[in-house]
Image: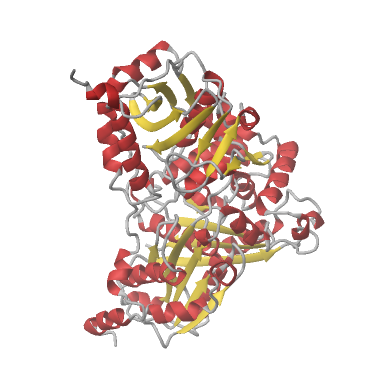
């Protein structure tokens, strides 16, 4: 396989965007083209989860490639739940690595706020098992709530630890112009004060309002290119060095131990093995914290910390900016936002910024190896990526 | 005999009990004081409200324009039994709520204007206004309308307000809804929170000056302006740009 590099990146704010979905998708593509200096591409992949259902639009990639005047490049839409973004990156990687294409644009885009929060929650819940989960009213917050309760009982994680994740990621997002939430929060305000239960009510016990990501619109793009193309561009050599993807049972209750996120574990193992690095080598990571408990659990499953010790690392500040392994310097899904189909590409965007040294006040010093974990379903389809900055 | 027209124009206010100030901790840990403001403080508030009349976002322009007129009417004694509460953080004005007493049983909620978005600032201020009507003034119900989707979600849905569509609201617009004493009691300690007495330093800071909002609502940036300027619906503008760049 050939080496694959990131030639260009682009992103919109993750927020409420009053624009057509096609435009939300096209904008980061345009920015990434400018960033790369490229004028054409061979293939476009657009990651999206809900256009057909939420926006009444199908064939999104066809619309976007024309909107960007990039025809006759090939175009296809990738739908793989909340892991659509990294799944599209994987397809782009394979296309370039195999030599089939030299330049592939990967866009993730979603416009979820076209519907209200209840409808958006229901739309995302359609990824659950239709007969064993969805028909009984299961939603992603409810699955995460049950998962968090089990995790607390088994490993001693407390609501305070969950709150610490939220406080950290809200703080990080303050330095990210593109983040959905620019709002500092404190443990006093969301857990300790007499008004805390009003400021931070239960959403799915034990998860509270500030344990859950917002519903966001947004788009992100990365352009993948071969080494030959990169030689002509004079851009930092950020190599997509490893990709892993793994699955788990569709219904969460069929897992031997629901607190084990085996798909995360396996996808991370593959992504590290391909890149020939290990978790200890990672300088910065973007993990899929749609719920605060997931950042803690994933930080263990990918190998940053021992199982059951992620919350202890959090207590010590190891995952904060300036810590041993900063997690979610962008603000994560928790505060940067979670436009589901765009999220995986947004994570890659942040890691490339970090490895280029362009993350400004949230820059992780001397970051050379970055890692992303894009978590689909409730852990039943996970894609991890390892990025390495070459000298 | 000369007639003093001002006496004819100026309504006679009832002797209403004042609102005892309260405070609460916000999600960011800051403490917000909500207190009744006097007429002579209205000129300090008006300039901050006026700026929001030009913010085209979530109906801020409409609400700010109406609040401005209501505050002015209160200042010049042109509305009977109106009151104004202000929410402040470290003296900074973060919300204004107002209303009127129609009769001993019925209150009329006018507006809730947040000058800082997020952190339930507006929600806490609205809840406090309801507390004034139900707990302090001992009214049976408060008539409420909403002018924005945010308001509708916060008031009509969160409090499960009752329909009073047959009763015209003084603000006009959509049909009236009502917060009854029973609904208020259900929301007590969940939506309606706060503590008394306000610690003296906090209260003194609030009374010392009404400081301008440091992060007032702004019109949203046109985040996709770049793409709009280069692309029309068919993308031909970008084709031209690519031709200029020699890409086609």
**Nearer-the-camera pick, B156 or B79:** B79
At horizontal 41% and vertical 31% (from top left) the residue drawn is B98
Quadrant in the picture for residue A251: bottom right
Mark count: 0
- Residue at far top of view: B200
**Nearer-the-camera pick, B135 or A381:** B135
Q: Quadrant for the C terminus of chain B, please.
A: bottom left
Quadrant in the picture for residue B94: top left
- Residue at far front of view: B1
Q: Quadrant for the N terminus of chain B, please.
A: top left
Find residue A354 and report its horizontal and vertical position in percent.
Answer: 40, 54
Q: Is residue A367 above or below residue A155?
A: below
**Nearer-the-camera pick, A241 or A63:** A63
Find residue B32 and report its horizontal and vertical position in percent.
Answer: 43, 25
Find residue A360 and report its horizontal and vertical position in percent.
Answer: 33, 49
- Residue at far left of view: B2
Q: Is residue B17 visible from the viewing direction of this image?
A: yes
Q: Is residue A222 above or below residue A101?
A: above
Q: Is residue A324 visible from the viewing direction of this image?
A: no
According to the image, what is the colour scheme of the structure?
Answer: secondary structure
Horizontal side, residue A55 vs residue B9: left or right: right
Find residue A178 and report its horizontal and vertical position in percent.
Answer: 39, 54
Q: Is residue A322 above or below residue B26?
A: below
Q: Is residue B4 above or below residue A338?
A: above
């Amino acid at each position: 396989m050939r080496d694959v590099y990131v030639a260009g990146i682009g992103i919109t704010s993750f927020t409420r965007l009053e624009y057509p979905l096609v435009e939300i998708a096209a904008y980061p593509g345009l920015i990434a083209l400018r960033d790369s200096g490229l004028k054409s591409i061979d293939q476009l992949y657009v990651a999206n989860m809900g256009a057909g259902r939420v926006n009444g639009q199908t064939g999104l990639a066809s619309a976007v490639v024309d909107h960007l005047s990039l025809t006759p490049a090939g175009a296809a839409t990738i739908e793989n739940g909340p892991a659509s973004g990294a799944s599209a990156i994987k397809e782009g990687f394979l296309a370039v690595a195999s030599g089939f294409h030299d330049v592939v644009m990967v866009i993730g885009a979603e416009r979820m706020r076209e519907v209200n929060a209840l409808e958006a929650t229901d739309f995302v819940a359609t990824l659950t098992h239709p007969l064993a989960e969805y028909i009984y009213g299961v939603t992603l917050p409810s699955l995460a709530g049950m998962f968090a309760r089990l995790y607390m009982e088994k490993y001693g994680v407390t609501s305070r630890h969950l709150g610490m994740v939220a406080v950290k990621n809200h703080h990080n997002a303050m330095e990210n112009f593109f983040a959905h939430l620019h709002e500092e929060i404190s443990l006093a305000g969301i857990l300790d004060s007499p008004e805390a239960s009003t400021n931070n009510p239960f959403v799915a016990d034990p998860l509270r309002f500030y344990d859950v990501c917002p519903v966001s619109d947004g788009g992100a793009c990365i352009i993948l290119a071969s080494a030959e193309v990169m030689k002509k561009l004079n851009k930092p050599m950020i190599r997509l060095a490893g990709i892993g993807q793994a699955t788990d049972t569709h219904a969460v209750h069929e897992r031997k131990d629901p607190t084990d996120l085996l798909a995360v574990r396996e996808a991370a193992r593959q992504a590290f093995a391909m890149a020939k690095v290990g978790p200890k080598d990672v300088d910065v990571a973007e993990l899929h914290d749609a719920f605060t408990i997931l950042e803690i659990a994933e930080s263990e499953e990918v190998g940053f910390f021992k199982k059951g010790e992620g919350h202890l690392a959090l207590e010590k500040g190891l995952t904060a900016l300036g810590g041993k392994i900063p997690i979610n310097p962008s603000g994560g899904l928790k505060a940067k936002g979670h436009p589901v189909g765009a999220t995986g590409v947004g994570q890659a965007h942040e890691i490339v910024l970090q490895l280029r040294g362009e993350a400004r006040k949230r820059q992780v010093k001397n970051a050379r190896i970055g890692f992303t974990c894009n978590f689909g379903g409730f852990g039943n389809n996970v894609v991890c990526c390892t990025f390495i900055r070459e000298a | 005999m000369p007639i003093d027209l001002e006496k004819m124009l100026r309504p006679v206010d009832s002797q209403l009990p004042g609102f005892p100030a309260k405070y609460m901790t916000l999600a960011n840990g800051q403490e917000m004081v909500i207190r009744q403001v006097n007429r002579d403080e209205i000129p300090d508030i008006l300039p901050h409200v006026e700026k929001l009349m030009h913010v085209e976002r979530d109906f801020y322009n409409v609400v700010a324009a109406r609040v401005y007129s209501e505050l002015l009417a209160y200042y010049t004694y042109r509305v009977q039994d109106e009151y104004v509460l202000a929410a402040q953080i470290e003296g900074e004005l973060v919300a204004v709520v107002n209303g009127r007493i129609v009769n001993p049983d019925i209150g009329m909620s006018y507006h809730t204007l947040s000058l800082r978005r997020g952190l339930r600032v507006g929600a806490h201020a609205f809840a406090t206004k309801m507390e004034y009507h139900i707990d302090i003034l001992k009214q049976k119900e408060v008539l409420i309308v909403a002018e924005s989707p945010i308001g509708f979600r916060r008031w009509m849905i969160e409090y499960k307000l009752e329909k009073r569509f047959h009763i015209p609201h003084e603000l006009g617009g959509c049909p009236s809804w009502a917060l009854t004493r029973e609904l208020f009691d259900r929301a007590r300690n969940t939506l309606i929170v706060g503590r008394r007495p306000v610690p003296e330093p906090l209260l003194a800071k609030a009374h010392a000056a009404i400081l301008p909002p440091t992060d007032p609502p702004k019109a949203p940036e046109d985040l996709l302006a770049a793409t709009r300027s280069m692309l029309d619906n068919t993308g031909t503008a970008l084709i031209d740009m690519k031709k200029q760049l020699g890409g086609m």
